[in-house]
Amino acid sequence: MSRDWQYLEDVLLPMDNGNYSRLKSLTGQEFSLETSDRNRTVKVKFHHVQSDPYAPGSQVEIKMDLPFAIGLIQSEKHMRPDKYNIHYFEDDRQNQFFNRFYYNAVRQEAAEDFLLREFWDGLDEVYRRRNSGRAPCPRGDKFIYQGDITVARPSCHILPRSAVQICWSPTNGRALYAGTSDTTTTDVGRDYVSIFMKVKLPGHGRRIDARGALRTFYDEVLHVVETRLYVAKGKELLKHINANVNQEWLRTEIKKQGLVCFVADGSILPRKKGNSEEPLSPVDGTGEKDVVLFASPPTMRRTFELPCSLDGQTGTGKGDNVVGMGVPEGLTLIAGGGFHGKSTLLLAIQNGVYNYHPMDGRYCCVTRADCVKIRAEDRRPVTSVDISLFIRNLPTVGDGRGAADTTCFTTQDASGSTSQAANIMESVELGSTLLLMDEDTCATNLLIRDKFMSELIPSGNEPITTLYECVDYFLNFKAHNETAEDISFIMVVGGSGQYFNLAHTVVVMNRYRAEDATAHAKSIIERARTEAPYLLQPKDSRPPVWPSIVPFDRCFYRSESFKAFTGPQHRPVKSKGNYYKEKYGKKNSAASEEEGDVQSGMRIGNNGMTSVTFNRTDEIIDVRYIEQLCEEGQLNGISSCVAMLLDEGNKVEAHVNGKRDGDNYHFTPAGEFIYPRSLTLSRTRHSKYSETVQCCEYLTRVAQMYVHTPSNYGSGRGFVSLFRTFELGAAINRYRRLCVKK
C-alpha cells in the first residue's frame, strides 16, 4: 500500500556517513516516527538544519496527536453557569474574562504549560537513565537534561509560550486561534500538539551519523512523548488548568473590589535559595527548623469563592474558598525589622502579575496586571522624559548655560534619584496604576528629606522634590481618564516613618507574620503633632507642576534611533575576525580593514537574562534591573520586537495608525489570537511611544510569538514567552541610541 509520508529512518539511513551538508535537504520536510501504537501519529518537521555538527542545534517541530486528556480544556462542566454565566457574546467587553474565547484561551495556556513541564520531566528521566553511573547535574532536587535536545525551560509561572502549542482544526468548529502549521500539510482536519525544540544532529567529524540521530529521536524524543505526554493524567492536568483559571479570575475580582493585590493564607513566600524559584521547605537541608506560612491580619482578611476546584474533579458544581490578605488601593507601607520578611512579601506581590504554578507555594498570590516595580538604577540612559514633577531648576555654570530642561530630560548617565524619577514617569506613561518600591533599592533623597537637611539646604538650592511631597498628586490623579482608577503605591520601609502621615494602610512584618498596624502608625503621628512637631517632615512650598506631565506626547522615531545601523551612511557591522582584532589586537597603523570583510546585516539577540545585544557592536540594552522579567523567553521576545522595529518600524507605525478609532486605539478583540484580550488606549492618556510598544506586543501575539525579521537573531521558533508591555517599554527606554521626541 502506498503512503504519502516517509519514516525518518527511510531518509536518514541512506545518508549515513555521507557529507554533513546533505542534511540540508531535510529543511522544510516532514517525516513520521514509528510509534508503539499504530493509532498514534508522531511526526518531525525540520524548519532549519545546522550547517555542521558543532553548530547550534537544528530547529525541529514535533507534531503529535492531541492526547485525550487535553479535551478537558474545553470542558465547562465544573463551572457554575448559574453564578458566572460564561456564555457571553464575543463582543461583551464588560465580562471579558468569562467570554467563551478568552476563558478557553486561559485554559489552553495552562494545558500547554503542563505539557511543557511534562516534557521537561521526561528529559530529566532520560538523562538519569543515560548517566546513572555518573555524577548528576542538579536542578534543585532534580536534574538538568544535558543531551542533544534544547527546549524552552519553564519558570515557576504559567505563561503563554511558543514551545508547546495546541493546534485545533478549523474544520471542527473548536478553533481558539490559528495553529502554527501550514494549511497545506496533512494535518488539516486533525487536532494536534506542536513541540518546538533544537536538536543537535550528531556526526563523525564532518560526516553524518544517521544512527546517532535516530537514537536521539527514538530513544529520547519519542520515548518522552509516549511515556509522559500520551499517558493520561487527567486529574493533574485539570488541577493545573483550574489553578490558572482561578488566579486569572481572582485578578479581575480584586480589581472590582478596590484591591491592588491579594496574598493567600497558607502561602510559602520565602524561596529555598536566592537563585532558586523553589519554595523553602523544612527538609531542604538548609538547617531551617520551621517554615512560617503566611497568615493574613484579621482586619485585612478577605474571602473569595473561586470558580474552579483543585481537587481534579469535574462536574462537582463548586469551587474552593480562598482566604487571604487583601491590600486596598492607596498608599500601603510594609514595615518591620530587618530580616522579618518585608522584601520577601514584596517579591511575592511583584511577581503576582503572573499566575503561579500550583506547587510553587504562592498559589493565589495575585497582583493587578499593570503593577510595576520601581527602583533606582544608576548610569541608565534616559531619553526625553518629563521628570519635572520630581526634579527642576537644575544648577547652571557661571555664564548661565548648562541647565537641562527636566520637562524633556535626556542623559546617558542618570543618577539614582534621576533614574528612579524616570522609571516612575515611564511606568505611568505606559499605563501602570500600581507602583512598588523597596527602600533598599531606592534613592533616599528622592523618598524623603528631613527638617535638618531642609535647613542646611534651602528649597531654593535643592532641585529634587521628594516623593513624600508629591505622592498625593499620584494618589488623586486619574491614571486613565475613562476610568476611576488612581495610582497606588506599595512601599517597603524600615528606616523612616515619615510616610505614616500619608499612608492609608500600614502592614508590619513581625517574625514573618503580617500585622495590621495602621491605627498604631496613625496614633504615632498624632502624638508627634502635639509632643514633637519638629520630627515631622515639612512639605515643600513649591506646588508640583502636575499639569505639565499630562498628556504624554513622547513619540518614537525609528529612523533616528537606528540610523547607526541603517541607511547609506550606516556604521558597518564588522566581521567577527575584524571586530575582535580591533577590540583586543595590537594597534597597527598599517593594518586596514578590507572592504570585502564588512558584513552589512545586523543581528539582534540577547545574552541570557542580562541584556539585548546588537551583534558585533558594543551596543547593548541592559535589562538586569527590570525586575519583573521572570524567564529568558520573555527577553527573547523583547529582542525580537527590537529587531522588528529596526526592520519593519514603518509597518508598525502604519499598524498603529490603522487601529485608531476616534480618540481611542483598539487592539486584539477577544477570541482572535493567542491569549486574547481587548485593549483600548485613550489618545488623551497614552503617548505615541506607548502606542508603539502596545502594538509590538500585539503583533507578537498575532505572530504566535515568532516574529521573524532579518535582524532577529534570537533562539528561534519555540523559545519565546509572552512578555508584558511594561517590560518591553522599559527595555526600549534603556536603548542608548533611542530617539524619542515631543
Image (cartoon, helix red, strand yellow):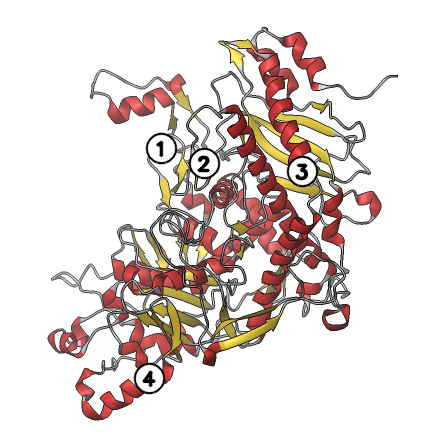
The residue under label 3 is which amino acid type?
Leu
Image marks 2 and 1: residues in contact by CB distance under 8 Å: no
Amino acid marked by disc 4:
His
Q: Residues within 10 Å of mark 1 (few under 14, many from 20)?
A: some
Contact? badges 3 and 1 (CB < 8 Å): no
* 4 or 3: tag closer to the N-terminus: 3
Q: Residue at x 55, y 71 (%)?
A: 254
State the CA–CA distance, disc 2 to disc 1: 10 Å
Q: Is residue 541 above or below residue 423?
A: below
Q: Which mark is residue 520?
A: 4
Q: Position of residue 619 (x, y in %)?
A: 35, 38
Q: Which mark is residue 617?
A: 1
Q: Which residue is mark 3?
A: 229
Q: Look at the numbered discs 4 and 1 and tell me whether their residues touch, using CB distance below 8 Å.
A: no
Mark 3 vs 2: CB contact within 8 A:
no
Name which residue lies at 51% across and 9% down: 206
Looking at the rendered image, the disc whose residue lies closer to the viewer, 4 or 2, is: 4
The mark that comes first in sequence, 4 or 1, is: 4
Left or right: 280 as drawn, with respect to 677:
left
Cα–Cα span, label 3 and label 1: 43 Å
**Depth order, front residue of 481/730:** 730
Using the numbered discs, state the Cα–Cα distance from disc 4 to disc 1 in whole angstroms: 56 Å
Q: Position of residue 729 (x, y in %)?
A: 45, 53
Marked residue nearer the N-terminal end (3 or 2): 3
Q: Amino acid at mark 2?
A: Ile
Secondary structure under tag 2 reads strand
Q: Is residue 147 left or right of residue 422?
A: right
Which numbered disc flags the more N-terminal residue, 3 or 1? 3
Residue extending farthest to the bottom is: 530
Residue on which the image places disc 2: 604
